[in-house]
Amino acid sequence: VPTDAVRADLDRICKLWSLARDRHGGDDPWLFDRYSVTDAYFAPVALRIATYDLPVTAAGRAYVGAHLRDPAIAAWRDRGLRDAYDPMPYRMGLPERPWPEADEYS
């Protein structure tokens, strides 16, 4: 269960995403209409939200879904699954779920 501090961070992230989309978004799902460095910056955040099934707004879920549907993200993830590495000491012992389907974040 996310702490109050984590929920506050998630609320702030969703507000930032909505502000960018409202002011600069277009038909594409990205924050500034076309995929940009900003979306690349938030990709790990979006994927962490999906991995831990963290509570975000409907607009936040749509943005996470855009990342999950992105072919470059899929290739990045596939490469990460093929490359062997020891995730310790980074594992935190938090519950995880199987990789979500993009349509869960529509």
Image (cartoon, rainbow, N blue to C red):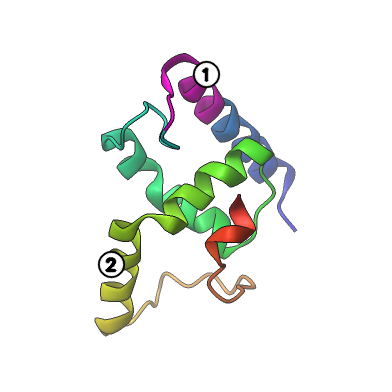
The label on residue 49 is: none
Q: Above or below — where is 1 with respect to 33?
A: below
Compared across the picture, whether 46 is left or right of 57 comes to left
For the point 64% across and 60% down, the residue is 53
Compared across the picture, whether 79 is left or right of 14 comes to left
Nearest to N terminus: mark 2 or mark 1: 1
User: Residue 90, image x and y in percent?
Assistant: 42, 69
Which secondary structure dominates the residues rendered in magenta? helix
User: Residue 34, image x and y in percent?
Assistant: 31, 32
Rendered image quadrant of residue 97: bottom right
Amino acid carrying label 1: it is Asp
* Of 51 and 60, the residue lying toward us: 60
Q: Which residues are magenta?
A: 16-27
Q: Above or below — where is 64 with respect to 84?
A: above
Q: Quadrant of the N terminus?
A: bottom right
For the point 61% across and 40% down, the residue is 10
Amino acid carrying label 2: it is Ala
User: Residue 87, image x and y in percent?
Assistant: 37, 77
For the point 43% across and 24% down, the residue is 25
Residue 68 within the segment the image draws in magenta? no
For the point 51% across and 30% down, the residue is 17
Residue highlighted by disc 2: 75
Dot 2 falls on a residue whose secondary structure is helix
